[in-house]
Image (cartoon, grey):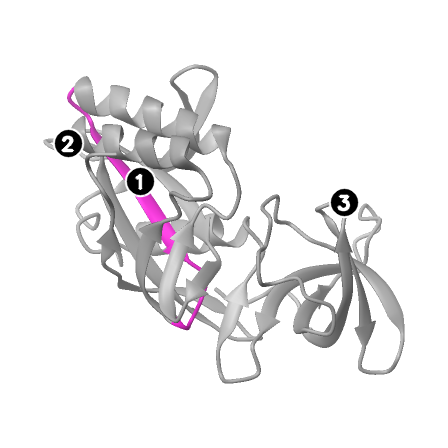
Amino acid sequence: MRFQTPLVPARLIRRYKRFLADCTLDDGREVTAHCANPGSMMGLAEPGMKIWLEPNDDPKKKLKFGWRLVDHENGHFTGVDTSVPNRALRSALIDRQIPDLDAYETVRPEVKYGQASRIDFLLTQPGLPDTYVEVKSVTLSRQPGLAEFPDSVTARGAKHLGELADMARDGHRAILLYLVQRTDCSTVTVAADIDPTYAAALAAATRAGVEVMALGCTLSPDSIDVANPLPVQIATAV
């Protein structure tokens, strides 16, 4: 999935109020960009980091730039926009590019279920159980090669796991899918020290029959695309 507008490089000055980031463009101008990431962005928001912004000329948008990538300046990137994975994954699901999910013809996003929640994707196909897919964007890495979720306490994430578990108990197929927006990680695990409640909810969900999957991404200032499956390390007896 190509970015709608070519990205431009910048240096981060500061991230604040979660959704705002002051940046310096290559021409010296200082601009404020929208940061579409509610998490802590641990290790990804240090002043001076090289980042990539997407300009826009939409008169309805107050901010004329959106922060899309962190450039680690070693050939690797991290995608920081948590809305991007669902858009990229939707295209991959429709094109039947996801292993184990390529048998489903109908892909419906944002379907109501559970207790006033919406599932990211509901997949249906005659002769197969309805499949509920909840997607989580993974950007944290504290050890080389290892991606972790979450990067901050997420009561909403634990709630979603409980609802997925209910779907599994009702005979549906329920999947938690981690989309790793880092090109420098090859394995995914749960950051139980950051949110032990989430880790316990995940363990309970897997015991109830929820499947856990992970996919990598290819990232560049031009595009983001869903890549190969990644192994997931989780404890089932938290």
- The answer to which of marks 3 and 2 sits earlier in the sequence is 3
Can residue 89 be seen from the camera position used here?
yes
- Left or right: 236, with 145 as reference point: left
Q: Which residue is drawn at 68% across and 66% down?
A: 46
- Residue 41, above or below 234: below
Q: How crowded is mark 2: few (under 14 residues within 10 Å), some or many (20 or more)?
A: few
Task: Using the image, tell me which numbered label, if any, was put on residue 101.
Answer: none
Q: How crowded is mark 1: few (under 14 residues within 10 Å), some or many (20 or more)?
A: many
User: Which stretch did the figure color magenta?
Assistant: 171-184
Q: Position of residue 60 (x, y in %)?
A: 81, 45
Q: Residue at x 79, y 54 (%)?
A: 58
Question: Which residue in the structure is indicated by mark 3?
Answer: 17
Residue lying at the far top in this picture: please name it. 115
- The answer to which of marks 3 and 1 sits earlier in the sequence is 3
Q: Where is residue 201 in the image (x, y as percent from the top left)?
A: 33, 29
Q: Residue at x 41, y 29 (%)?
A: 158
- Left or right: 56, with 116 as reference point: right
**SS under mark 1:** strand
Distance Cα–Cα, label 3 vs label 1 = 29 Å
Q: Which of marks 3 and 2 is in front?
A: 3
- Residue 228, above or below 106: below
Q: Where is residue 67 in the image (x, y as percent from the top left)?
A: 68, 61
- The answer to which of marks 1 and 2 sits earlier in the sequence is 2
Identify the image quadrant of the C terminus.
Answer: top left
Question: Which residue in the structure is indicated by mark 1?
Answer: 176
